[in-house]
Image (spheres, rainbow, N blue to C red):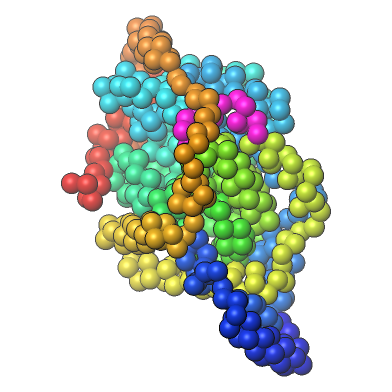
Amino acid sequence: MYFSDETQKASRKLTEQWQANVQNTLKTNTDWKNRFSTVSDLDIKRLYTPEDLQNTDFARDIGAPGEFPYLRGNQVTGYRGQPWTFRMFSGMGSAEDTNARWHLLLREGQTGLSTAFDFPTLMGYDSDSPKALGEVGKCGVAIDTLEDFLALIDDIPLDRVTTSMTINPPATVLWAMYCAAAEIKGVPLNQIGGTIQNDMLKEFIAQKTFMCPPEPSVRLISDTVEFGAKYVPRWNPISISGYHIREAGATAVQELAFTLRDGIEYVEDILRRKKMSVDDFAPRLSFFFNAHIDLFEEICKLRAARRIWAKVMRDRFGAKNPRSLWMRFHVQTAGCSLTAQQPYNNVVRTTIEALAAVLGGTQSLHTNSLDEVLCLPSEHAVEIALRTQQILAEETGVVNTIDPLAGSYFVESLTNEMEAKAWEYIEKIDAMGGMVAAIERGYPQMEIADAAYTFQRQIEAKEKIMVGVNKYATEAQHPVPLVEIDEKVGEEQIRRLKDLRRRRDSRAVSQSLADLRAACKNGANVMPHCITAVKNLATEQEICDVYREVYGEYRDPGLY
């Protein structure tokens, strides 16, 4: 037991006395709210005591950092050995524009790169596609070819800086560009490090950037995992993402459960398709979570995530390598918590969310800028967001000790509750036949829709408060400078693309695309063929069109 019988007995006696005092107080001084709950609507008790942890065993359930069940973190020295990576999400306009922002952030103390692509790139279309009209470079960087990519990474030391790329349907193409660019710059593939998001299941569940149906989409992900394990050992070939699930309206428990069940689905697919043991690839799996505004709920979610994943990898998949049991994750503060009203309040929200991520033990962190609800981040706003992380790391003392909230009656109880509720979801999806089957039935999509509807009703009824939106709203304006991408960026991007098509070797492009098409049809790994194609200056859309041709295009059944 976590506490002795004597401690439990004393706790009960003190709690009974306290409860009597509470009842007397409430006769003349009532609570200011009828109900206290988390952002995700989990009930919160007035007081937590040893009684709430009577079934918790310290050695079994909490343990030490760097030891199973990894609740307290993967590293035995925590942040004393190394702070988390400051990895600000950046992408705007042209490759040259984004490269300039990267260099600015690196000069200001950022320690890792993170790439935001524009919508055409995210969807696998070139900048001159009719479907790209009006969107080129607007919400991220436009990348059509290897030449664009080389401009993007100009003067970036690829063997010393890790790069994350938030790309999903065309992940094989953008990773192929990164690999090809490294080779052109003389950096061996075994020396580059970074992450591609490459998580299509959460696209079907939440974010809705589609290309091919679920089954071939997962197959392409398995190809990247296999290729990475063999040739790019420092790369994370997937970042299993709960962030967008939460942004779509999921509760913290749903984010936790659906993300981890997606991870299970990917592991099962790799084991089924590839001649690999789980320990061959599991150490390079990574995760991506949302840090919302409820401080303690978010801390508990991240702690529970590590414990669940360690149990899954050991007990479900029989992993033997301790690193296979580690859940390594990046966190981004919650975009959906930012408000256009009183936007400077967003600095406070982001700070609290970043604190939750750090107290939850993140390995990497992006802090949103105050203006992101309105536009791409300005240099001033992004500097404040980066400084937020640096102040946390260097001034607040949060790096001094590991998992400082461990042992809190409230924190351990809420961690246990969130884990238990997540397991219920995981077991329900198992019973449906797995996550792909659940998605085809619309199960996670409906659960998230119901949660989003419930939260919106609570906001409208003022059961949940958003300062400046449904309480303390004012007529006063708080303008912030807006970053806008000039239309000339798109025009120049299209001009360069057309010029490239005229001067490249069309026969080499056609042959490499034919080889890729054959690999898709016969089940060979597509990555070597993608790398060859991008080196021959095939465009992103030309490669993605091969996928669409062979595998078909997916349409969300909820929209048709």
In the image shown, does 311 or 47 lie closer to the viewer? 47
Residue found at x 38% / y 71%: 428
Q: Is residue 448 left or right of residue 410?
A: left
Question: Picture quarter containing residue 272?
Answer: bottom left
Q: Which residues are magenta?
A: 372-384
Residue found at x 68% / y 56%: 359
In the image shown, does 435 or 103 lie closer to the viewer? 103
> Is 506 one of the magenta-colored residues?
no
Q: Is residue 168 above or below residue 178?
A: below
Residue found at x 66% / y 60%: 322
Q: Is residue 437 left or right of residue 196?
A: left
| Residue 554 seen in render | yes
Residue 126: x, y in percent?
A: 35, 22
Residue found at x 64% / y 72%: 410
Residue 127: x, y in percent?
A: 35, 20
Question: Picture quarter containing residue 296?
Answer: bottom right
Q: Is residue 60 above or below residue 68?
A: below
Residue 119: x, y in percent?
A: 38, 30
The residue positioned farthest toward the left in the image shown: 560
Q: Is residue 316 left or right of residue 50?
A: left
In the image shown, does 418 or 15 lie closer to the viewer? 15
> Is 379 one of the magenta-colored residues?
yes
Q: Is residue 19 above or below residue 292?
A: below
Q: Is residue 518 above or below residue 136?
A: below
Image quadrant occupied by the N terminus:
bottom right
The residue positioned farthest toward the front in the image shown: 28
Residue 36: x, y in percent?
A: 53, 69
How many numbered marks, from 0 up?
0
